[in-house]
Amino acid sequence: MAALGYTAPGLICVKLARKIVRARTHDPKIEVVKHPLVAASLAILRAKTTASADFRRALQEISVLLLGQASAGWETVPHQVETPLQSCMAEILARPLVLVPILRAGLGMLDGMLALLPQAAIGHIGVYRDEKTLRPATYFCRLPGTISEAQVVLVDPMLATGNSACQAATLLKSSGATRIQFICLVACPPGVRQLHSQHPDIDIITAAIDPELNDSGYIVPGLGDAGDRYFGTG
């Protein structure tokens, strides 16, 4: 048992990272989802011994939980329905929904989210990171025609340098999107600052904020390469 008043060094780093995010982003519109099921799924994802099948299941589960939190502020409109007994007023979503994974790792999050929102349209943005410059390059972009009217959810497991997310958000806006949220599993201060410096209107919903990037641009402690672990190509 830890001594009274003792704070683990790792916890200090996480708290410091959150303070840095709030202090240095242009608009600290970031929410770290605190929920026991989110924490439990994230622990599975972080563990290097987690097999691909368990990694896939945990990633899909945590994606649904994060989407639930992200959707809490979505607009609704009144709608009359007929119950088996009588008519009553209910509420339905005011806007169409578009889910946009950043390829390829974002596809794992999409798999879980579609179980909750099977009616959503789907866009795809392919961005890869140059391993030398760490800059993004777009190789694919296909978006629904309803995107200008829709609530758009951009998803990628990691918000590391922020370059890929910024590139994807720019593509979404150039196609007419005006209501965009970004959901990731793990973020870090440099990525948050980067995304909010270029797109201060985009809310970030995440399960954790880790302290730093390593020299290769990976989040530390992070969870490794989410795409490789999800698809079993690591």
Image: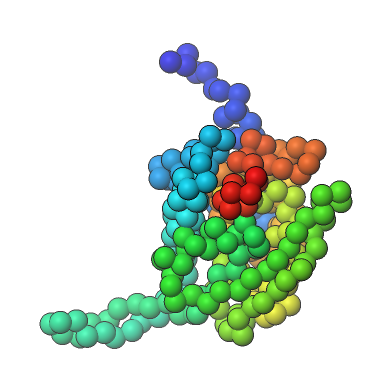
96 shown above or below 3? below
Is residue 75 found left or right of 136 in the rendered image? left
The image position of residue 77, as x and y in percent, is 40, 80
Residue 179 visible in the displayed image = no
Residue at the outermost right position: 133
The image position of residue 190, as x and y in percent, is 74, 46
Q: Nearer the viewer, residue 230 or 204?
A: 230
Name the quadrant containing residue 150: bottom right
Q: Nearer the viewer, residue 163 or 197?
A: 163
The quarter of the picture where the C terminus appears is: top right
The quarter of the picture where the N terminus appears is: top left
The image position of residue 57, as x and y in percent, is 45, 51
Q: Residue sitting at 60 percent across and 41 percent down?
A: 223
167 shown above or below 162? below
Residue 43 visible in the displayed image = yes
Q: Residue sitting at 67 percent across and 77 percent down?
A: 142
Q: Nearer the viewer, residue 4 or 53?
A: 53
Q: Residue sitting at 52 percent across and 46 percent down?
A: 52
Q: Nearer the viewer, residue 1 or 31?
A: 1
